[in-house]
Amino acid sequence: MRTALENGSDKPKFVGRGSDWRHLLSPTGNAGDAVFRGLMLSAALLVVAIVASMIFALTSDSMLSIRQFGFAFLTSREWNPIRGEFGALPFIYGTVMSSLIALLISVPLSLGIAIFLVEQAPYYVARPIGFLVELLAAIPSVVYGLWGIFVLAPFLRVYVEPRLARWLGWTPFFRGSITGIGLLTGGIILAIMVTPIISAVVRDVLAAVPSSQREAALALGATKWETTRVVLVNGAPGIAGAVILGLGRALGETMAVTMVIGNRPQISASLFEPSYTIASAIANEFTEATQDLYLSALVELGLILFLVTFVVNGIARILVWNVTRKTGGVARAA
Amino acid sequence: MECNEKDGWRGESCLMTNFERSDQIRRTTSAVMTSLTALCTFVAIGILVIILSYIAWQGIASLSFRFLVDSPRPVGEGGGIGNAILGSVALLALSSAFGLPFGIAVGVYLSELGKGRFAAIVRFIADTLTGIPSIVTGVFVYTILVLPMKHFSALAGGVALALVMVPIVARTTEEMLKLVPHSLREGALALGAPQWRVTLGVVIPAGASGIATGAMLAIARVSGETAPLLFTAFGSRFFNYYLDQPIASLTMQIYYYALSPYDEWHAQAWAATLVLMTLILSINIVVRFLTRKRF
């Protein structure tokens, strides 16, 4: 039996006598249906239009800077608003490095949390604890920043960074003056912020792995950890998706990073040194930008950030969808 | 050797001990890794507890009724966050007015009407829009609203927050409506109701509590946003009752006070954070309580 629902809106199967406006939108030709469908469809179209106009607005407003600097914008180290020189490399470096530090810390942590919640903890423990971990995602970025300035940064300055400098000072990464404000602090704050996001998605991915896989491993005499490894291998594409999703979030995080990373456009191997990210450059300098070229360069930074996160998120969604959709699981909107 | 004494069949018993030894290693590995995962969880929850208790401890110190209703004053004269609370409420009301109907309509389209390639594209774009940094949304709204209007405004701030809200509301609405049993729709259609009446009169009421919780979560998320407001709503140190003027928000107030060099303003930032966190956490806990049975 076919209902009106199943006929679909785009290709009306039963176009009746009069193919007037009502039949364009509704297969039944009911006027109310046509209006209703038209309204909902225009909302959906508006979403597409917003993204399209985002791309258009960001591109057209950064044209000035694109024409002036071209590709060199991405490779130049010089960011000097007074002399009118704008190069994005220090910001790209700061964004990529802080996100990498964040992933380095949060990926093992999130995997551990997800494995604990799905494979180990009994239901009545996993639910409240899962909720508490998710609460970490509910804390606003600016609050993480406040906490970062007054708690995390002093803690790192006094207890962690001196030790890192002593033990690992022979590497180029842990040298220089110890202030507590810099790339390392930014990376750690980001790690705390993306952990609930990655772990929530990995949780859904692991839960979507069929339990027959676990039963088969256990029946062959595998230990709990060996069973978990089988599950991890099965969920690998989804886990990769979750990590990329976390990367997307880390790349675009603004307030918390701005407050602890030091905001100095420089490229230094040392993680103790202040750095600057694309997002924090926009946040700090946008309202100060008086010349057209300066503003245009900042909008171009926004365009870069938009395109990168759009692609990164797209890849992540495809990976996660493919895993969770097969078993009817639902990937939470992170 | 041990394996000789255990059993007459030398080969097999030796095999057994080797097996037992490797079994020991495997069991230890399993126990170690299992406890490591528990440790990871413990670390995450520990961080949550440290952050929340620190906010409560620091925030309570400068919280008072005057602080909640007064507007900011110069350093040394006290002052409060009354204008920021009012501003946040106004921005949330504005963004909900724009974002909720829009997001719910998109969700209804995706769940009830959209089929095939176009719906898949809309769903994909909504999902990726969730991951677009909110600072970029701020830049976008600046170029389309603030530049033409020539000044920062509460309206622009509301639109920026609404753009953050839409994809979240759309996707939760879609998921919630998909949970409504198909038989309800078929029953209503069989009674001769047109599709718009089936959706508005049967499907949406059946999924209403789910849509409401999705909307609340979106409001909680947006109430903590700072980045999209910096160059749209811009912030203000006064009470503002006009939508075409710059307006304050709790989050921007926290940001500016945190970066100021004054201890008194730092203390006020903590108190404002306590107010904000109370709002956000209570929404999250209420939503959790309401959805207990569903998930």
Image (cartoon, coloured by chain):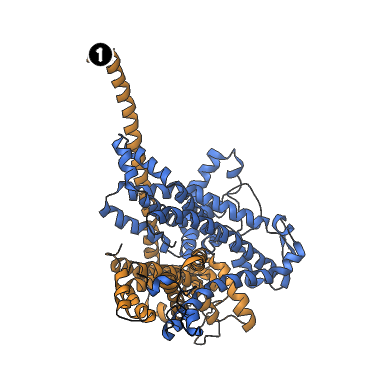
Please identify the quadrant where the N terminus of chain B is shown.
top left
Please identify the quadrant where the C terminus of chain B is shown.
bottom left
Residue A219 seen in the current view:
yes
Protein chain holding label 1? B
**What residue is rendered at 56% in x and 60% in y?**
A309
Q: Which chain is orange?
A: B
Name of the residue lying farthest toward the front = A17
What residue would you read off at disc 1?
B9
Q: Which chain is blue?
A: A
In this rendering, the answer to whether B238 lies above or below A253 is below
Residue B276 seen in the current view:
no
Q: Residues within 10 Å of mark 1 (few under 14, many from 20)?
A: few
Residue A136 lies, in percent from the top left, at: 40, 59
**What residue is rendered at 34% in x and 59% in y?**
A131
In this rendering, the answer to whether B240 lies above or below B285 is below
Q: Amino acid at mark 1?
A: Trp
**What residue is rendered at 52% in x and 54% in y?**
A247
Residue B57 lies, in percent from the top left, at: 37, 63
For this view, does B113 lie left or right of residue A271? left
Residue A314 lies, in percent from the top left, at: 53, 59
- Give the secondary structure at mark 1: loop
